[in-house]
Amino acid sequence: MKYLKYTSILLIVVSVIFTILFMIAPATKENMGMVGPFLTWGYVLTGLAIVLSVGLPLIDMIKDPKKLKKAGINIGLVLLVFIISVLIASPEALPVNMENAPPTGPTWKWTDTGLIMMYILAFAAFAAIVVGGLVNAIRNR
């Protein structure tokens, strides 16, 4: 697990370097400065997070098949939140001034879906923290 520590440190150092370069690079209308490389690094980190968040539990489930049931329940809950978010999301455009190509209805719908999922999951996380704290406080009386 030593490699994990060094990999994390490397990712943090590269992220700090990109952030510093992003802040000091001059950006004009013709030259976006470090926006492109900064976004690319964000995509790399997002892809890495997705691969690790899917891959590591799969490896764990292969080692211990009993965890497959729990994983199936968790995947079902995430799909339920996704379906609820899609049903609530609206394809209506917001009144914004878009000089270039304005987003289409499906783009607005997927954006709303992502936002609603984030709200639901953030509320669930907050509720779990509060309920967990209250349960621990009551047990430790």
Image: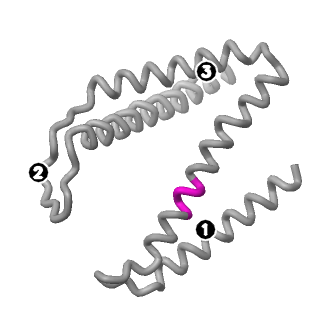
Q: CA distance from mark 2 to mark 1?
A: 35 Å
In the rendered structure, which disc, 3 or 2, sits on the residue that comes first in sequence? 2
In the rendered structure, which disc, 3 or 1, sits on the residue that comes first in sequence? 1
Q: Residue at x 60, y 43 (%)?
A: 50
Occupied quadrant, residue 52? top right
The answer to whether 102 appears left or right of 51 in the picture is left
How far across and how far down the image is residue 11, in percent?
A: 68, 63
Occupied quadrant, residue 86? top left
Secondary structure character of the magenta stretch overall: helix
Circle 2 SS class? loop
- Name the front one of labels 3 and 1: 1
Q: Amino acid at mark 1?
A: Ser
The answer to whether 94 appears left or right of 114 in the picture is left
Q: Amino acid at mark 3?
A: Ile
- Number of numbered callouts drawn: 3
In the rendered structure, which disc, 2 or 1, sits on the residue that comes first in sequence? 1
Q: Residues within 10 Å of mark 3 (few under 14, many from 20)?
A: few
Of residues 58 and 67, the one nearer the viewer is: 58
Q: Which residues are magenta?
A: 41-45
Image quarter (top left, top right, bottom left or bottom right) of the C terminus: top right
Residue designated by label 1:
15
Residue 138, numbered label: 3
Circle 3 SS class? helix
Up-down: is 57 above or below 104?
above
The answer to whether 87 appears left or right of 96 in the picture is right
Q: Residues within 10 Å of mark 2 (few under 14, many from 20)?
A: few
Up-down: is 102 above or below 87?
below
Circles 2 and 1, Cβ within 8 Å, touching? The answer is: no
Q: Residue at x 64, y 50 (%)?
A: 48
Residue designated by label 2:
95
